[in-house]
Image: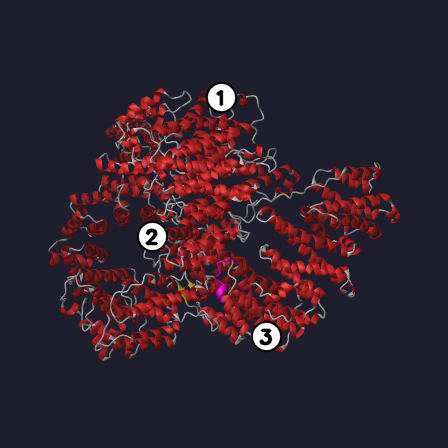
């Protein structure tokens, strides 16, 4: 269901001149309609659409006219006028097309007349001499040739000479004019397009000439036509060679050159060889006609530029005839020459536009080759066979470009591949395609590629069409599953789903042909549908989402019958598998399938409901599911339909209301967006279907026909719609209650906004619902209060909504209220809190729309101006905005005056930026194109600019100082005062008084100063009250001054940027009309330049940049020549200044060059992208020469600047592909800069390098270092940056030459690290063929040598970097050669660094090999066997003879990895037994067995111990397996007895060893518990026998915290039935003492991790003891409950909250919902309160964990009560509601209502101390500058109050409960009444409009007020007797 409105077509009407009208009036007859009167009527219409209708009536009328009327002068006159009109109409006007198609039907007898008229008009046209009118003539010539028979005849009659002459003249004139207008981009672009059209028209004409002129008379060299043709050819050749023209003009000229030559050349058979010679540059003048040499001399003589060759190839392919073999052998040679030229160009042309053209032309070549092959010679078939050289090179091109960053190139590459396959098929016609070796080889290669290669998908898709899906599946059945696995990455999902679609479509076709019966459908479903369902139920969130978005619709569209299969399977398991917070479950999958099916029209909701496919209960469960996406899918099922007019049923409306109750408060922005857009679709459906219903209601007759079938009456439905919309609006306005969270507000306002938009239909149309009628004054006030939100997006939404309703809004507000709002806005604009001015801006922007504003509010502050009254045409907004800006400006000017005296005073009392922000805001919503008070605005703009400069002068010294952040010391000690003096000397600020000269804290001084100020304050100023008593003492901190200054700079920049935008609105002719003059714009430009190049504070220059960008964008578009040239001048100036490195320069060389990169970025980004980007080219050339200087220049500052600027430019996305040609130079500069002796250069080089890596390989999104994303194949990398191949190789050579010197001294080459970083990002592709000159092989020996570096990190990097360079099948060979290179124990010279580097390389290579997909092949096993044998020969390195512990550890790591992997695929055979035996030998030889003789200070000891421990654990888990334990061979028996036990490891003195052992045990336990080792479960279990005692002992003695934590976790995961019997003997405690001990641990530990696990263990003990009827003392239980309550406190860490949630879930069944009260009422309710608290936690993970408590309770309820359906997996808001419901039921069940209700009432009232809270908040509010009070992301106190009170009221009414004289209630009543009085008092004490001035406090009081009133209501109910009660409840 798509929501798009049709665009209305605009048609400009034609108008006839006076003479033409007179002529028509002479001939028209009043009594009957003739041609003249029809035309006259047509000309008098003002609407183009009506004229079209009228023109269509001409032909029928003409056809009726008599045969002899051709002589009638009236007809002649009318045809003349039609001709003149046709040529006068613009080419894009639909009237022209309509007129042409009408005249195409002109009867024979009128043809001659019409042709005469047209010829006459066209002759006039061709006399045009104005260059700027040529375009019109050209368009007319083109229109005459396009599907217009009359036009074509006209051209035939008119002599070709005339037209050719005109074309020849126009080409030369336009070229000349273009030369004269060099630099004027706008005019040049226009001329280029004219030139393009002229060339196209001349080509069309020549093609027509060839068709029409028989014989070759014109080929006489004296004939006029011939000479014109020569001139055209010459011009085209010149254009082709002219690189300053647009690329499209050059391309078209390439076509023209070939076309004209083809028309003129004889004999035509020789033409291909002429073109071949041109392309190959082997032109011999002997055989070439003289005319060709004289006109195309430039093409014959010179070495042609690459781009010209490219365009000539295109011309030859497009203009020559390739079919039917008409060009013979020469043609075939040309075809092959073209492709070789194109392929050689592909390595040269790197610019994005030419690379795109090249790929497109290659695709055209493949199409031409296909055409030529069909009738080609056998020789051509051999040349173009799949195994031929040419196809090989084309495949190279494809593999290099299929991942190209440009979309167009990737698309063309796919086309080339597709055509190549067709070409090969054509060459092997007759033989079997399926078994063809070329296809087989290609398939195998493509499948061996990794799935992250995007090119793989499209190519496989093309292959499937050739060889069929079945053949591919025979190679690997798991392919569909593999592709589905890829779909958790959004960038790959579209490609993957397209490939799947191609495959399943082809497969179904194959099945349908092969099998007659329909039995195959199940097999098809198993392959393509079943895996999808598994992922939808259990897959991860992203994967399921992308499959639903991309794959499911394709599957359903192709095979709608599969839907019933899917529903059948999902329904069967939906109740059992409802999903969870992380998986969708069968229910979620079902919702997704139904939603997709309904949205694509495969299902109706009524069918779903009535056929019982899914019950309302299920949809309800879906709507409040814990998994966000299930909610969205369930909502989508209700909202999305195929028809936008489908009627919304009652059930749908009820379900939507249910959804809105619980889902507005979603913390995920994407979920909120989806909710809003889905509801929007629903409202559109209501709107559209209501219009249909109104029409039905009007057509009563139709209504009666439908009467029988339609069950619901239209008026009834409309009323339901109205009620539904009204109740939705009520709910949404309710959601804006005090303290509602940001997500709730955002959702409610967004939905209200779309309601206002959708239901605002033009007047006169019946409207089902109007939001205006739902609005009252409280709702308006609520919306205005949303401006006080701390989130800007809420302010924006509220503002937009109020604008849609502003008539109603203002009618409902009285003038007193508006006055208060205006006052509040003006106060906020001068607040010291930065976010207050944003609120002020929104308030003012809202108020300026009110007609009475100037009388109500402005009258007090601004003297009355005459223009306010007399000029009634002035719009309200304009008048009010002008007055508001004036008022703000007066204040700013006065504040600047005071700030000059004292900046500190300004920062503390009236930071000026707020006012300026409000001015900018007011300006931005003004309609500048139709202002009436132009003179006033001009004056205002001038004043604003002046004010900006003044303000900037006051604050700029601070942001331009060398250390703006610490400008005022925080302390008043003498040392910092001294520091301040230095800073002051440096910046000499404007402050004249002694604040700056004597550093002090500004307290008392403030009093005296503000009194002084009060004396000379003008009357106009309204800030007096603000600076009253409460602001008297203010500490001025450095932060306050800095914020005041940089924000003022920011606002000035944005204001000036906004003012610049006023320039384009002026007319070019009359500069005085503009609001801003050219001079002013130039000054603003200089201002920005000054600040960007001198500010030191990032905030200041980043925002100056924002304003400057607005200016530069405007400059590139404006008409004034001098302004257009400015960016170029500025750029060359700043580059000169950087180059000169003048000592007096003020450019900032630290702070990453501060604003300079921003300045240059803004200038370059504003340059038009479509042009030649000359500025960018010039700048990059300059910068790169500065960044990589050839000689060691004296000053490094220019180099640092250049590197910093380059970094900014490479990071700027706006420069797009245009910057890619400079990447290689950038990398070189960075690597060379990294070797500089100067730190600043190295630092900037590193930053540049990092930016370039991101630019080349893309933004890194994942954490996985080894992932194949953000990498590319070596071939792709070096073909895109060819200059880096020799550079990197050379650098590597230099680096490694220093490593292998025999002397062991430390030579560290700085760039080694960077080289390895780049090389580590490359990988070889199986597609690397034999053709690649850029082979990766030369790098391998160098990288291996890098492993000998003395730097540890470099050795590690070389290990990683080697992996990508070695193909998988080469790994065994490489590993063996590396291992053989290791020394023997007897070698004389053993260098440990070399050994270590080699071992790391072996480790990484083996790791990649063992994880690769080829674990099954026999080569793999053979290779692995060889490696194991070889490793055995060097085992001494892992044993004691090797003295270096680091290399011993590295060797052990290799053994651990092998051991782990071999354990996974145990293959029988002696060699493995041998391997395990050797491992046992290594272990028994190790220090772990014999005792460790070293102290931990030995380097590498810990590393070694960890590695040997991992080996022990790995071997233990393998040898405990059934294969070895049950084997009878003597070797196996020997292996089965381990040389070290687990217990031995646990007793080791080094905690690292214990920790590894404990972690392994924990993992085994968890696997046993989750039944993962069910089959071989015995294996690991035998290792854990009898360890319980050891763990208990460890728990008491362990000192290391990490180990202690793991021990506790192990005990928690063990079965207590095994643990508790051992407590007595191993630690002398009984179970109760163990419980007390674990509770004490929670108390005394400082680690949250230990506290959490100890509490979980204690809780498990409590439940175990209680269930086994063992006594626990009251005190211990109380303590346990208190700890749970403590864990659920507000400020606790997430880890503790999650532990509490887990504990609560574990005790739910036994303690919380048990029929007996085991803990007693108050404790049980205390634990329930913890659940409620956790359900309101800000953290989603915590809320989800707490919701599981409710899941357990609801599931128990379902089992015990046997209810059909209970909501179980629910989100937090629903869980909270259910929790209160369950609690009220339990109170009844326990019979504790009387005792329980007062406790719940206390929860309602809350336990806050209002007085204390208000005092602390007042203190806090002034403390922090940026603290916005409590930012509310989720928790809402009133939500839980409302839900609890709802359930309490239900409970009271059900049980008729009264407690007339209950002491507890009386106490509560007293407290509530006292609090009610206090709240009223505190609210009255606040200032007017407290929602803006004291937002946090006002909100808190409003919440408390509602809590108290709800509580009092219930208390009154409980006290009253039954009679009153029922009345009260009814109320």
Mark 2 lies on a secondary structure that is helix
Q: Nearer the viewer, mark 1 or mark 2?
A: 2
Residue 1365 lies, with reference to residue 1008, above or below; the image says below
- Going by the image, does 8 lie left or right of 1146? right
Of the two numbered discs 1 and 2 on the same chain, state the one appearing first in sequence: 1
Q: Nearer the viewer, mark 2 or mark 3?
A: 2
State how far apart marks 3 and 1 are (Cα): 88 Å
State how far apart marks 2 and 3 are (Cα): 62 Å
Q: Horizontal and vertical percent for residue 1462?
A: 30, 71
The region drawn magenta spans 399-407
Of the two numbered discs 3 and 1 on the same chain, state the one appearing first in sequence: 3
Q: Horizontal and vertical percent for residue 436?
A: 53, 76
Of the two numbered discs 2 and 3 on the same chain, state the one appearing first in sequence: 3
- Residue topped by disc 1: 855
Q: For the residue carrying disc 2, how many other residues have a C-alpha within 10 Å: few (<14), some (14-19), or many (20+)?
A: some
Q: Is residue 589 visible?
A: no
Q: Which mark is residue 427?
A: 3
- Residue topped by disc 2: 1240
Q: Is residue 265 visible?
A: yes
Q: Quadrant of residue 1501?
A: bottom left
Residue 1062 lies, with reference to residue 439, above or below; the image says above
Please tell me whether residue 405 belongs to the stretch shown in magenta. yes
Residue 1773 lies, with reference to residue 904, above or below; the image says below
State how far apart marks 1 and 2 are (Cα): 62 Å
The answer to which of 1902 and 1635 lies nearer the viewer is 1902
């Amino acid at each position: 269901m798509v929501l798009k409105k049709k665009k209305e077509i605009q048609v400009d009407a034609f108008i006839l001149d006076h003479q033409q009208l007179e002529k028509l009036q002479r001939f028209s007859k009043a009594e009957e309609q003739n041609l003249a009167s029809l035309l006259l009527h047509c000309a008098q219409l003002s609407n183009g659409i009506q004229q079209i209708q009228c023109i269509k009536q001409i032909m029928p009328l003409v056809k009726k006219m008599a045969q002899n009327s051709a002589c009638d002068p009236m007809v002649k006159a009318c045809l003349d006028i039609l001709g003149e009109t046709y040529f006068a109409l613009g080419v894009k006007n639909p009237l022209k097309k309509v007129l042409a198609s009408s005249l195409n039907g002109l009867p024979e007898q009128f043809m001659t007349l019409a042709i005469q008229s047209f010829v006459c008009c066209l002759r006039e046209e061709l006399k045009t001499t104005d260059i700027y009118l040529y375009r019109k003539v050209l368009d007319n010539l083109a229109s005459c040739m396009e599907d217009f028979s009359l036009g074509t005849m006209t051209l035939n009659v008119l002599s070709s000479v005339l037209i050719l002459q005109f074309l020849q003249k126009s080409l030369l004139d336009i070229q000349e004019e273009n030369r004269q207008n060099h630099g004027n981009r706008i005019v040049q672009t226009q001329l280029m397009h004219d030139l393009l059209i002229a060339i196209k028209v001349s080509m069309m004409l020549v093609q027509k000439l060839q068709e029409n002129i028989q014989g070759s008379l014109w080929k006489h060299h004296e004939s006029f036509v011939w000479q014109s043709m020569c001139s055209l050819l010459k011009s085209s050749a010149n254009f082709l060679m002219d690189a300053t023209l647009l690329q499209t003009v050059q391309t078209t000229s390439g076509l023209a050159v070939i076309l004209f030559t083809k028309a003129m050349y004889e004999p035509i058979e020789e033409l291909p060889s002429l073109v071949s010679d041109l392309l190959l540059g082997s032109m011999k003048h002997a055989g070439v006609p003289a005319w060709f040499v004289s006109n195309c001399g430039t093409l014959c003589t010179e070495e042609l530029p690459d781009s010209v060759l490219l365009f000539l190839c295109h011309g030859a392919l497009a203009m020559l005839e390739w079919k039917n073999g008409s060009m013979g052998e020469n043609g075939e040679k040309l075809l092959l020459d073209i492709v070789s030229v194109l392929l050689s160009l592909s390595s040269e042309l790197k610019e994005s536009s030419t690379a795109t053209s090249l790929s497109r032309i290659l695709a055209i070549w493949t199409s031409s080759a296909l055409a030529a092959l069909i009738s080609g010679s056998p020789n051509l078939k051999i040349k173009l066979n799949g195994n031929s050289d040419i196809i090989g090179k084309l495949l190279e091109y494809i593999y290099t470009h299929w991942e190209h960053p440009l979309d167009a190139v990737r698309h063309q590459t796919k086309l080339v591949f597709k055509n190549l396959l067709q070409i090969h098929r054509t060459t092997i016609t007759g033989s079997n395609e399926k078994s063809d070796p070329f296809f087989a080889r290609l398939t195998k290669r493509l499948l061996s590629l990794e799935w992250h290669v995007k090119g793989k998908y499209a190519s496989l898709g093309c292959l499937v069409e050739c060889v069929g899906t079945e053949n591919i599946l025979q190679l690997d059945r798991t392919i569909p599953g593999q592709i589905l696995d890829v779909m958790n990455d959004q960038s790959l999902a579209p490609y993957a789903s397209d490939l799947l679609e191609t495959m399943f479509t082809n497969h179904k076709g194959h099945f349908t042909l092969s099998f007659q019966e329909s039995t195959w459908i199940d097999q098809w479903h198993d392959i393509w549908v079943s895996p999808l369902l598994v992922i939808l139920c259990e897959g991860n969130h992203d994967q399921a989402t992308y499959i639903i978005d991309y794959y499911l619709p394709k599957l359903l569209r192709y095979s709608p019958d599969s839907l019933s299969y899917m529903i059948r399977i999902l329904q069967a398991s939906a109740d059992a598998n409802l999903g969870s917070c992380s998986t969708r479950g069968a229910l979620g999958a079902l919702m997704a399938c139904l939603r997709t099916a309904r949205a694509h029209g495969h299902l109706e909701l009524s069918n779903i409901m009535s056929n019982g496919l899914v019950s309302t209960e299920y949809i309800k469960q879906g709507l409040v599911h814990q998994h966000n996406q299930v909610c969205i899918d369930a909502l989508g099922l209700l909202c999305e339909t195929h028809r936008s007019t489908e009627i919304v049923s009652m059930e749908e409306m009820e379900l939507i209301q249910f959804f809105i109750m619980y889902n507005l408060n979603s913390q995920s922005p994407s979920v909120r967006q989806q909710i809003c857009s889905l509801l929007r679709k629903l409202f559109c459906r209501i709107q559209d279907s209501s219009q249909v219903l109104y029409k039905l209601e009007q057509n009563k007759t139709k209504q009666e026909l439908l009467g029988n079938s339609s069950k619901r009456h239209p008026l009834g439905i409309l009323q339901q719609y109205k009620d539904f919309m009204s109740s939705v609006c009520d709910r949404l306005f309710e959601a804006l209650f005090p303290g509602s969270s940001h997500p709730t507000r955002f959702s409610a306002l967004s939905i209200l906004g779309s309601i206002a938009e959708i239901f605002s239909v033009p007047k006169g149309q019946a409207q089902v619902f109007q939001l205006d009628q739902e609005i009252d004054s409280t709702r308006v006030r609520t919306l205005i209060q949303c401006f006080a939100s701390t989130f800007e997006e809420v302010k924006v939404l509220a503002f937009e909504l109020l604008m849609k309703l502003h008539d109603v809004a203002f009618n409902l507000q009285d003038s007193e209220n508006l006055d208060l709002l205006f006052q509040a806005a003006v106060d906020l604009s001068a607040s010291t809190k930065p976010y207050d001015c944003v609120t002020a801006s929104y308030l003012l922007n809202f108020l300026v729309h009110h007609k009475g504003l100037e009388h109500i509010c402005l009258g007090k502050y601004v003297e009355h101006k005459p223009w306010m009254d007399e000029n009634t045409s002035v719009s309200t907004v304009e008048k009010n905005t002008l007055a508001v800006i004036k008022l703000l400006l007066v204040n700013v000017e006065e504040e600047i005056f005071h700030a000059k005296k004292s900046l500190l005073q300004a920062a503390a009392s009236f930071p000026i930026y707020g006012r300026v922000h409000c001015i900018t805001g007011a300006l931005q919503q003004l309609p500048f194109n139709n202002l009436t008070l132009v003179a006033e605005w001009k004056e205002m703009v001038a004043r604003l600019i002046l004010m900006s400069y003044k303000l900037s002068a006051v604050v700029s010294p601070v942001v331009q100082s060398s250390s703006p952040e610490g400008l005022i010391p925080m302390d008043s000690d003498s040392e910092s005062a001294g520091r301040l003096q230095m800073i002051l000397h440096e910046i000499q600020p404007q402050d004249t008084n002694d604040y700056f000269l004597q550093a002090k804290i500004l307290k008392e001084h403030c009093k005296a100063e503000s009194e002084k100020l009060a004396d000379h304050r003008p009357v106009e100023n309204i800030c007096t009250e603000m600076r009253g008593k409460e602001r008297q003492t203010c500490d001025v901190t450095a932060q306050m001054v800095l914020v005041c200054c940089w924000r003022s700079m920011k606002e000035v920049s944005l204001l000036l940027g906004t003012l610049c935008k006023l320039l384009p609105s002026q007319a070019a002719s009359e500069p005085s009309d503009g609001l801003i003059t050219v001079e002013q714009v130039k000054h603003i430009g200089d201002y920005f330049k000054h600040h960007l190049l001198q500010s030191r504070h990032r905030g200041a220059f980043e925002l100056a940049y924002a304003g400057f960008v607005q200016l530069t964008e405007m400059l590139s578009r404006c008409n004034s020549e001098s302004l257009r040239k400015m960016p170029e001048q500025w750029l060359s100036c700043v580059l000169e200044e950087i180059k000169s490195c003048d000592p007096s320069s003020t450019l900032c060389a630290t702070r990453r060059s501060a604003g300079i990169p921003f300045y240059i970025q803004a200038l370059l980004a504003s340059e038009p992208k479509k042009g030649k980007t000359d500025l960018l080219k010039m700048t990059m050339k300059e910068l790169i020469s500065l960044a990589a200087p050839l000689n060691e220049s004296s000053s490094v500052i220019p180099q640092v600047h250049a590197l910093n600027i380059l970094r900014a430019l490479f990071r700027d996305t706006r420069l797009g592909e245009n910057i890619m040609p400079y990447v290689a130079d950038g990398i070189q500069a960075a690597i060379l800069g990294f070797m500089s002796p100067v730190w600043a250069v190295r630092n900037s080089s590193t930053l540049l390098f990092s930016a370039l890596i991101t630019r080349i390989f893309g933004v890194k999104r994942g954490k996985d270092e080894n992932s194949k994303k953000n990498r590319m194949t070596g071939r792709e990398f070096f073909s895109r940056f060819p200059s880096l191949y020799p550079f990197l190789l050379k650098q590597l050579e230099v680096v490694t030459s220093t490593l292998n010197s025999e002397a062991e001294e430390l030579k560290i080459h700085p760039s080694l690290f960077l080289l390895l970083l780049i090389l580590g990002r490359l990988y070889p592709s199986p597609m690397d063929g034999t053709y690649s000159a850029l082979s990766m092989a030369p790098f391998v020996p160098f990288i291996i040598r890098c492993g000998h570096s003395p730097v540890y990190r470099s050795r590690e990097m070389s290990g990683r970097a080697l992996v990508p360079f070695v193909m998988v099948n080469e790994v065994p060979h490489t590993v063996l050669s590396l291992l053989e290179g290791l020394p023997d124990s007897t070698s004389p010279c053993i260098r440990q660094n070399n050994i270590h580097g080699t071992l790391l390389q072996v480790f990484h290579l083996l790791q990649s090999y063992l994880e690769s997909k080829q674990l099954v092949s026999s080569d793999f096993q053979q290779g692995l066997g060889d490696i194991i044998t070889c490793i055995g020969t060097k085992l001494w390195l892992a044993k004691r003879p090797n003295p270096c512990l680091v290399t011993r550890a590295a060797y052990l790591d290799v053994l651990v990895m092998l051991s782990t992997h071999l354990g996974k695929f145990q293959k029988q055979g002696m060699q493995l037994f041998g391997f395990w035996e050797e491992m046992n030998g290594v272990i028994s030889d190790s220090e772990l067995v014999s005792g460790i003789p070293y102290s931990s200070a030995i380097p590498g000891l810990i590393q070694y111990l960890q590695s040997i421990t991992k080996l022990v654990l790995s071997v233990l888990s393998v040898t405990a397996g059934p294969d070895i334990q049950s084997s009878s061979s003597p070797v196996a028996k020997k292996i089965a007895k381990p040389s070290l036990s687990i217990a031995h490891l646990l007793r080791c003195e080094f905690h690292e060893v214990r920790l590894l052992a404990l972690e392994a045990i924990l993992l085994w336990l968890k696997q046993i518990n989750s039944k993962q080792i069910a089959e071989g479960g015995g294996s690991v279990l035998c290792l854990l026998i009898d360890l319980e005692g050891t763990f208990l002992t460890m728990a008491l003695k362990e000192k290391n915290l990490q180990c202690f934590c793991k021990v506790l976790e192990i005990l928690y995961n063990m079965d207590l039935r095994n643990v508790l019997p051992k407590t007595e003997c191993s630690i002398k405690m009984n179970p109760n003492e163990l419980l007390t001990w674990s509770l004490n641990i929670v108390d005394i530990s400082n680690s949250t991790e230990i506290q959490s696990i100890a509490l979980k263990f204690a809780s498990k003990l409590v439940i175990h003891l209680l269930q086994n009827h063992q006594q626990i003392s009251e005190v211990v239980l109380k303590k346990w409950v208190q700890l749970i309550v403590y864990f659920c406190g507000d400020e606790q860490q997430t880890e503790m909250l999650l532990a509490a949630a887990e504990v609560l879930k574990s005790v739910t069944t036994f303690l919380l919902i048990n029929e007996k009260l085991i803990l007693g009422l108050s404790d049980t309710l205390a634990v329930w309160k913890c659940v409620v608290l956790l359900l309101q936690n800000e953290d989603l993970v915590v809320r989800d964990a707490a919701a599981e408590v409710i899941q357990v309770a609801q599931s128990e309820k379902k089992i015990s009560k046997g209810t059909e359906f209970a909501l179980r997996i629910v989100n937090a808001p629903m869980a909270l509601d259910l929790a209160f419901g369950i609690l009220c039921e339990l109170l009844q069940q326990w019979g504790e209502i009387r005792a329980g209700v007062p406790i719940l009432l206390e929860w309602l009232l809350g336990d806050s101390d209002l007085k204390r809270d208000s005092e602390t908040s007042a203190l806090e509010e002034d403390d922090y500058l940026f603290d916005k009070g409590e930012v509310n992301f989720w928790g809402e106190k009133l939500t839980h109050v409302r839900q609890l009170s709802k359930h309490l009221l239900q409970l009271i009414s059900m049980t008729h409960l009264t407690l007339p004289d209950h002491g507890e209630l009386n106490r509560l009543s007293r407290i509530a009444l006292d609090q009610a009085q206090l709240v009223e008092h505190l609210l009255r004490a606040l200032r007017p409009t407290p929602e803006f001035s004291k937002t946090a406090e006002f909100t808190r009081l409003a919440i408390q007020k509602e809590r108290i009133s709800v509580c009092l209501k219930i208390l009154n109910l409980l006290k009253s007797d039954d009679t009153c009660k029922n009345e009260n409840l009814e109320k």
